[in-house]
Image (tube, coloured by chain):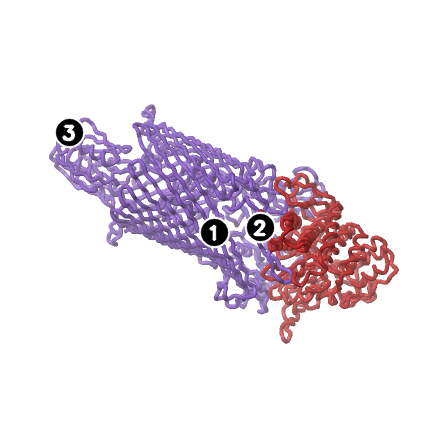
């Protein structure tokens, strides 16, 4: 059909609305949806292949970076779809029910605002376009990040007032709900230092009946997809939309390629079960470094000598044979994850979003990918209150709820802490809880710690032994290996450069600068 | 139409007539004028003549035997000259006989052989043989239309073989032009012709690539040697537009594709280069027009022709990759250079040194090229044609079978073609042509595509296992093992392309000067593409499974079906009044096309031997379908006028309407005018008669159009796709491309000046100069991405092409050695004048002020030699060390970024040339085609040339890398995935000019005595070599004809072949 006649009935309107949602689901690297690869541009992950995403991580990216272009282009594509719907919706006003009309409008506004929410965090000031553009007036200047954030908050407020708490039974899940709108509103407010809005919106979400999923590890598998913790996720279905996350994350024995991996510092960041960092806790034993750790370490990360997809995962290079538990009885097989030159460079892997159900066809997974979940909302609430210095019991309650879900059960944070102490706690908590979910980049930027955590050598494990002692862990959970005697044996993976005068924002893609004379490039590019 | 004495048949019955009466009668029934002197006019003797459908030359010879005259043919005029009878009593009459042939050794049937100054004469038979009685002092005169007559004094020998050379002035040569033919001498536009002989001399599968090097101004680039993919990209006079720059191809009056024809089917090709020649094709002619005429039966005689060759292909160029140990050592150096740990251990290196190939499972050392390039590379062509007919019908039926196997497994091209060209004469006034062509082409590639095979073959390091010692497939690169996926039989991409073309002409000629033509030419084609992508299991050496890639076997079956209709009516009128010649053409045509596409998919195939949809799992079935159509409606006309055959004028015009544009923008008018002055016909040139055989000046101007921009550029259409919610599929609809309803034609205006010169009947020279301006170029100009839609086409660009072309042909003979040399050279300077100020970035870009598809990047200034140099230089990319590439800070802002990109090369070939030598010596013949480009830039990137690109391996040439001890190296210091060195920069640009021996052929025609015994007329055997010699300065290991890329193309091939031509 041609655009002139589109939306002649409710069915067509639905096509248009679903097209808006579909626009959000794009890949920043082949078969790697954007939320799940974004962490490689931060201190908690590294991409092995020579990809544009890797260049962002090591600071060699420019305004011609192809991945940055994808984010810009796809979010604006989604925005244009929403604008088109919102502009042409009116023609159906008399033909469809008020409920459908209002809800469709609110959903499109949600998708549009969500796109702007990401755009401003990645690029800073961006053109705010809210109507269909003709070829004659395409050159729109940038609006300030604050203005766009306000727009997102307003739009989400409106959407939340219209959208239902849950979709009626005959409608699909995976669409925007009141909770999703409020959660993104809260996150936008938090990212933009509007503490009160962030806290109050998060509080509203907390009253909608979301629940933390008991089993943390299961939340990122097929089993967890219908969890009440998930507020909004990207949708997948074999035959329609799939991703290859398990292939890129899993070990070589498991049929994967160990592509995006956590560095040693991420592992050392996790607390001991006594709630202390490894450099302070008496429970830490350098020769058994993974014992007595926050359970989220093993749930989020594949540790040496654990099992992944039925294979013993061991990255000590001297370990040439390992167990394959997929056979009965288990058998010994050559250990590619230690001997293959392209086994994980760091000695570790991410476990989130790897479900053994995908072992046979790991490039075509259809596990939904979470964009926001209830645990994050709790942490938003806590952080907003901490930053507003409005510290009350509800702050501790929110953090502790996350720390104490049945499968995690970390010690409670005791009350009575000051703002700075709580700030450190909440920042570390986000790092443990939300690792490999694409939120780290925004965090290190807004906390202003990117140059501290990003610069210098990215290190992997020592190939055939453990660190002789714990590194020093700072208030952000970042490890310093200068105090470790055998640090020189750690594997050097990449030398990263982070230019604080430039790298807190991505460049506007060069093509935009060339085609839109109203745009100004971000500093340093 | 062609006129000659051999082809003109007359029926005459006159008794007791004078010569004048007889000649007057001949003038009446033929198109010849006859001039004669007083002695003939006043001859009172009576002669009888009685012939039915007899060849005119025979009639004249018979008559001259009675009436003592000789005749000459000049320009449609038969000149009769009286001869005086010599002594009536011949004394020493001897028989002389022999054979008359042309320079290529083809017997010339119907050659007139006469004794000078007598009326005695004969003609050669079908085999060129003659026999005549002569006396001692006789001079034999051999003449044949279109050839230079030879006079040879009788020297006493009873055998006299003669070779006649073609008359290069070719006064009567007729060439195919748009909607008709024209005498070559009367052409006013720029046109090149290519004969059947020139394109059948090369063993090629795709006819488009056969045009390479043959005509000035016609550039053919052949990027690949892949069976079915080795087509030539034809560019006439540069690149005029930013989208599709391919010329319009017209086969027997109907739009078609050159590659649908076997070269043997083609009679001639005319390339229309300037606006005057092609503007009558209006909206599709901006890139030039290629007119193809297929062969038709010329006589009633039944002739059978069989042509065959078989050859073997080998790759022209392959990069020389390092072995496993070199790869390991060099990788470790690169890792250390990057501040990383060495990737490989010392133990491994030691193991390679001490144990190595005796334990390939622990120490793989795979020669990927050696194991992948295992296709037979055999190609062969069979072509059989039968022609003949009766009084009212004639036919030529041709069957062709071409089969080409690639240099890798699962790569082949096969074409089966049948064509029947029939002529039916219902009456003098009403005639019909009925041509039918059936063809079927099948191309096979590995399922992943051929470029994937070449990509991985040259990317995977030698230390990755290809085949384990127990014979199983090694893991390759994460399961990508090109040995496996090019070998496994089921893993195929099979495209088949059956086509039916009907082409009918009805010609009605109510009076001599007027002819009506109706052309109906429907075409049906189907294209199906099956991609069976079979899982390949790779194994660890101990037989545990490594990878299965792809995880699930799948089959995608695509089918598209097109129906093209062409209906055209035209009227032609021509007449002469004294010295004025006028002809007029008017026509109307309508073309439409509809294409329907369906695609179906399943996966989960358990029985890979049965790759049909039904054997796949029902779980994941997908399908899609679409349809497109377009139509074109046109009015066209032409007026030709010439005065005394000296002053020539032609006016063309076409009014085209296309469905591709919105209401109000559908129609465009494309006029042209051209003129010529045949200076050589002027009286003042008479003194130079015989020196300057032809001299003509031409000039033309015209306007052409281009509408080739997809089918619905003016509407914004909603793309229907799917998404899922909650594991349930839903449909989506989205506007993807911005609309531009104002879109209209792009218009090309071209001015052409040309000169044709003929010297001593041996040398002809043609030179052309042109200036071609294209406005309103349909271009998907970049628009801000914030609009959220794909960029639409806009009438955005202005491009200029200025160029010149020279063609020279020299023919001569030295004794039995006959030869001709054809040299062409042309240049075009291309410049993008305007793109509305929006310049694209990227590797090959079109930017204002430079040529289309220029190479764009940083200007490399060699290597950083010291740390200090890095510190004082502008900031580059990431961590930079000595030995890395240093880039010029063009804007002096202290940062190297995209603002420092400049044009660093041009990909448009300049000074393209071809040189063709044909020669015969007795029964031997020889052909050589050299072809090349004088100036062009090439650029390899990624896997093609960058060391260790994305973890790949390196080539032998990379060993010359920068170290403090080797500062003047060919390559930067070794690094892995180093953003700084992998930027697009002038460092990776190389000169892509070349000279190449495209073709070398040596043939031998078996002596008549031998072939006659075998019952055949003619048997010629030949050997042929393709691409035997290349001289270039491009990157080692890569074919210079594919100069921009990541080096994953199937390279051009050398072909050594043997063939034969057989007639009976």
Q: Which chain is red?
A: A
Category of crowding for the residue at label 3, using alpha-carbon neighbours closer than 10 angstroms: few (below 14), some (14–19), many (at least 20):
few
Above or below, B577 against A100 in this view is above
**Mark in the foreground, 1 or 3:** 1
Mark closer to the chain start, 1 or 3: 3
Q: Secondary structure at mark 2?
A: strand
- Residue highlighted by disc 3: B43
Question: How many dots with numbers?
Answer: 3
Q: Quadrant of residue A274?
A: bottom right
Q: Are marks 2 and 3 in contact (CB under 8 Å)?
A: no
Instruction: Identify the chain of the residue marked 3, using the numbered disc in the image.
Output: B
- Which residue sits at x=53%, y=48%? B1036
Q: Describe residue B262's horizontal placement relative to residue A178 as left or right.
A: left
Q: Position of residue B556 (x, y in %)?
A: 52, 59
- Residue highlighted by disc 1: B595
Q: Extreme front residue here?
A: A94
Category of crowding for the residue at label 1, using alpha-carbon neighbours closer than 10 angstroms: few (below 14), some (14–19), many (at least 20):
some
Pointers 2 and 3 within a single chain = yes
Q: Position of residue A156 (x, y in %)?
A: 73, 52
**Mark in the foreground, 1 or 2:** 2
Above or below, B806 against B605 in this view is above
Q: Are marks 1 and 3 in contact (CB under 8 Å)?
A: no
Instruction: Identify the chain of the residue marked 2, using the numbered disc in the image.
Output: B
Q: Quadrant of residue B674?
A: top left
Which residue is nearer to you in this view: B1058 or A157? A157
What is the drawing colour of chain B? purple
- Residue highlighted by disc 2: B718
Which corner quadrant holds the C terminus of chain A?
Answer: top right
Instruction: Identify the chain of the residue marked 1, using the numbered disc in the image.
Output: B
Marks 1 and 2, Cα distance to the nearest angstrom? 19 Å
Q: Are marks 1 and 2 in contact (CB under 8 Å)?
A: no
Q: Quadrant of residue B714?
A: top right
């Amino acid at each position: 059909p041609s655009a002139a006649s589109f939306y002649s009935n409710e069915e067509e309107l639905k096509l248009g609305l679903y097209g808006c949602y579909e626009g959000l689901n794009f890949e920043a690297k082949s078969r790697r949806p954007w939320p799940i690869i974004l962490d490689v541009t931060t201190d908690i992950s590294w991409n092995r292949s020579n990809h544009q995403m890797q260049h962002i991580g090591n600071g060699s990216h420019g305004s011609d970076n192809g991945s940055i272009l994808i984010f810009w282009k796809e979010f604006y594509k989604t925005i244009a779809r929403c604008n088109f719907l919102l502009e042409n919706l009116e023609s159906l006003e008399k033909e469809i029910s008020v409920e459908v009309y209002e809800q469709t409008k609110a959903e499109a506004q949600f998708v549009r605002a969500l796109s702007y929410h990401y755009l401003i965090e990645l690029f800073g000031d961006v053109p705010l376009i809210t109507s269909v553009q003709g070829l004659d007036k395409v050159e729109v200047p940038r609006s300030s990040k604050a203005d766009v954030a306000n727009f997102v908050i307003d739009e989400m407020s409106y959407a939340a007032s219209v959208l239902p708490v849950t979709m009626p039974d005959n409608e699909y899940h995976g669409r925007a709900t009141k909770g999703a709108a409020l959660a993104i509103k809260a996150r936008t407010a938090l990212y933009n230092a509007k503490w009160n809005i962030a806290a109050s919106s998060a509080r509203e979400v907390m009253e909608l009946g979301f629940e933390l999923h008991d089993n943390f590890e299961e939340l990122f598998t097929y089993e967890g997809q219908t969890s009440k913790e998930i507020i909004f996720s990207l949708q997948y279905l074999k035959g329609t939309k799939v991703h290859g996350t398990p292939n890129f994350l899993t070990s070589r024995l498991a049929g994967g390629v160990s592509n995006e991996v956590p560095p040693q510092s991420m592992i050392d960041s996790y607390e001991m079960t006594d709630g202390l960092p490894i450099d302070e806790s008496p429970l830490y034993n350098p020769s058994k470094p993974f014992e007595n750790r926050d359970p989220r370490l093993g749930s989020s990360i594949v540790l040496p000598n654990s099992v992944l997809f039925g294979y013993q995962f061991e990255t000590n290079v001297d370990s040439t044979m390992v167990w394959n538990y997929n056979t009965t009885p288990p058998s010994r097989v050559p250990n590619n994850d230690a001997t293959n030159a392209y086994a994980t460079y760091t000695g570790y892997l991410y476990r989130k979003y790897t479900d053994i159900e995908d072992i046979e066809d790991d490039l075509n997974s259809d596990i939904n990918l979470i964009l926001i979940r209830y645990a994050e909302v709790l942490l938003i609430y806590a952080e907003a209150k901490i930053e507003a210095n409005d510290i009350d019991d509800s702050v501790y309650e929110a953090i502790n709820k996350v720390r104490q879900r049945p499968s995690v059960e970390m010690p409670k944070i005791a009350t009575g802490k000051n703002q700075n102490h709580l700030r450190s706690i909440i920042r570390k908590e986000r790092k443990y809880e939300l690792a490999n979910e694409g939120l780290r980049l925004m965090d290190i930027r807004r906390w202003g710690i990117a140059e501290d955590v990003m610069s210098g050598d990215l290190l992997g494990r020592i190939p055939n032994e453990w660190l002789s002692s714990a590194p020093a862990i700072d208030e952000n959970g970042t490890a310093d290996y200068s105090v470790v005697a055998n640090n020189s044996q750690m594997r050097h993976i990449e030398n990263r450069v982070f230019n604080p005068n430039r790298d807190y924002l991505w460049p506007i893609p060069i093509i935009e600068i060339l085609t839109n004379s109203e745009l100004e490039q971000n500093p340093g590019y | 139409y062609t006129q000659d004495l051999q082809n003109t048949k007359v029926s005459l019955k006159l008794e007791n007539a004078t010569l004048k009466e007889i000649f007057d009668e001949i003038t009446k029934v033929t198109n010849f004028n006859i001039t004669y002197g007083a002695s003939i006019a006043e001859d009172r003797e009576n002669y009888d003549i009685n012939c039915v459908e007899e060849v005119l030359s025979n009639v004249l010879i018979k008559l001259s035997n009675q009436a003592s005259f000789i005749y000459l043919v000049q320009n449609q005029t038969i000149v009769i000259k009286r001869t005086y009878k010599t002594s009536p009593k011949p004394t020493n009459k001897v028989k002389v006989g022999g054979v008359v042939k042309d320079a290529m050794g083809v017997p010339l049937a119907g050659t007139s052989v006469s004794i000078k100054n007598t009326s005695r004469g004969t003609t050669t038979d079908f085999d060129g043989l003659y026999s005549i009685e002569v006396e001692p002092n006789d001079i034999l005169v051999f003449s044949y239309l279109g050839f230079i007559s030879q006079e040879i004094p009788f020297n006493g020998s009873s055998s006299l073989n003669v070779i006649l050379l073609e008359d290069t002035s070719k006064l009567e040569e007729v060439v195919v032009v748009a909607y008709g033919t024209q005498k070559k001498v009367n052409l006013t536009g720029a046109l090149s012709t290519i004969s059947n002989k020139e394109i059948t001399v090369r063993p090629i599968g795709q006819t488009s690539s056969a045009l390479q090097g043959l005509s000035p101004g016609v550039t053919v680039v052949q990027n690949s040697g892949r069976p079915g993919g080795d087509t030539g990209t034809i560019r006439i006079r540069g690149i005029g537009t930013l989208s599709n720059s391919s010329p319009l191809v017209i086969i027997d009056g109907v739009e078609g594709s050159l590659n649908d024809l076997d070269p043997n089917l083609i009679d001639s090709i005319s390339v229309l280069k300037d606006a005057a020649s092609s503007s009558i094709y209006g909206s599709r002619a901006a890139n030039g027009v290629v007119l193809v005429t297929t062969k038709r039966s010329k006589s009633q005689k039944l002739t059978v022709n069989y042509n065959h060759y078989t050859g073997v292909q080998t790759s022209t160029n392959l990069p020389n990759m390092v072995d496993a140990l070199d790869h390991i050592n060099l990788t470790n150096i690169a890792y250390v250079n990057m501040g990383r740990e060495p990737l490989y251990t010392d133990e491994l290196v030691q193991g390679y040194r001490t144990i190595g190939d005796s334990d390939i499972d622990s120490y793989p050392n795979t020669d990927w090229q050696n194991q992948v390039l295992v296709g037979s590379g055999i190609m062969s062509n069979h072509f059989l044609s039968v022609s003949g007919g009766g009084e009212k019908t004639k036919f030529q039926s041709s069957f062709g079978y071409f089969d080409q196997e690639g240099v890798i497994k699962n790569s082949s091209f096969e074409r089966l073609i049948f064509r029947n060209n029939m002529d039916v004469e219902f009456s003098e006034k009403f005639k019909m042509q009925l041509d039918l062509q059936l063809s079927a082409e099948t191309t096979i590639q590995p399922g992943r595509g051929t470029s994937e095979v070449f990509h991985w073959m040259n990317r995977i390091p030698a230390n990755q296992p290809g085949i384990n010692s127990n014979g199983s497939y090694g893991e390759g690169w994460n399961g990508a093992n090109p040995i496996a996926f090019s070998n496994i039989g089921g893993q195929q991409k099979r495209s088949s392309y059956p086509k039916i073309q009907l082409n009918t002409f009805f010609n009605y000629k109510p009076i001599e000067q007027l002819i009506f033509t109706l052309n109906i030419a429907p075409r049906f084609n189907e294209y199906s593409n099956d991609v069976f992508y079979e899982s390949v299991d790779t194994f660890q050496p101990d037989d545990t499974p490594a990878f299965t890639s792809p995880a699930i076997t799948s089959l995608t079956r695509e089918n598209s079906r097109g129906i093209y209709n062409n209906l055209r009516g035209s009227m032609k009128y021509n007449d002469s009044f004294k010295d004025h010649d006028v002809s007029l053409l008017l026509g109307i045509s309508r073309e439409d096309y509809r294409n329907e596409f369906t695609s179906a998919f399943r996966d989960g195939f358990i029985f890979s031997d049965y790759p049909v949809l039904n054997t796949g799992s029902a779980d994941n079935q997908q399908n899609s379908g679409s349809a497109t159509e377009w139509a074109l409606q046109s009015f066209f006309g032409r007026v030709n006028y010439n005065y005394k055959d000296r002053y020539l004028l032609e006016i063309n015009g076409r009014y085209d309407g296309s469905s591709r544009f919105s209401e109000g923008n559908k129609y465009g008018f494309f006029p042209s005018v051209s003129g010529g002055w045949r200076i050589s016909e002027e009286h003042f040139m008479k003194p130079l008669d015989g020196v300057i055989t032809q001299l003509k000046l031409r000039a033309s101007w015209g306007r052409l159009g281009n509408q080739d921009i997809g089918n619905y550029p003016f509407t914004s259409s909603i793309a229907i796709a799917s998404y899922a919610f909650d594991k349930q599929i839903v449909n989506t609809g989205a506007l993807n491309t911005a609309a531009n309803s104002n879109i209209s034609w792009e218009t090309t205006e071209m001015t052409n000046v040309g000169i044709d010169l003929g010297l001593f009947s041996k040398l002809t020279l043609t030179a052309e100069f042109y200036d071609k301006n294209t406005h309103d170029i349909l271009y998907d100009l970049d628009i801000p991405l914030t609009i959220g839609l794909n960029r639409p086409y806009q009438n955005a660009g202005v491009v200029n092409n200025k160029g010149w072309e020279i063609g020279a042909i020299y023919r001569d003979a030295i004794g039995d050695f006959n030869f001709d040399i054809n040299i062409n050279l042309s240049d075009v300077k291309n410049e993008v004048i305007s793109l509305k100020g929006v310049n694209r970035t990227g590797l090959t870009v079109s930017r204002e002020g430079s040529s289309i598809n220029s190479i764009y990047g940083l200007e490399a200034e060699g290597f950083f030699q010291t740390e200090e140099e890095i510190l004082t230089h502008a900031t580059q990319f990431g961590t930079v060390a000595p030995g890395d590439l240093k880039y010029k800070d063009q804007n002096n802002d202290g940062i190297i970024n995209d603002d420092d990109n400049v044009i660093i090369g041009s990909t448009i070939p300049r000074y393209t040339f071809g040189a063709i030598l044909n020669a015969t010596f007795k029964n031997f013949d020889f052909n050589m085609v050299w072809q090349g480009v004088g100036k062009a830039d090439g650029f390899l990137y990624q896997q093609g040339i960058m060391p260790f690109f994305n973890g790949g391996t390196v080539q032998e040439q990379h060993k010359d890398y920068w170290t403090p001890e080797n500062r003047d190296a060919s390559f930067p210091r070794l690094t892995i995935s180093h953003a700084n060195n992998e930027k697009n920069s002038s460092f990776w640009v190389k000169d892509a000019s070349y000279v190449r021996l495209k073709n070398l052929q040596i043939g031998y025609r078996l002596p008549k005595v031998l072939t006659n015994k075998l019952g055949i007329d003619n048997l010629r055997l030949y050997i042929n070599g393709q691409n035997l010699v290349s001289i270039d300065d491009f990157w080692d290991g890569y074919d210079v004809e594919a100069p921009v890329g990541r080096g994953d193309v199937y390279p051009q091939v050398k072909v050594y072949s043997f063939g034969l031509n057989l007639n009976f």
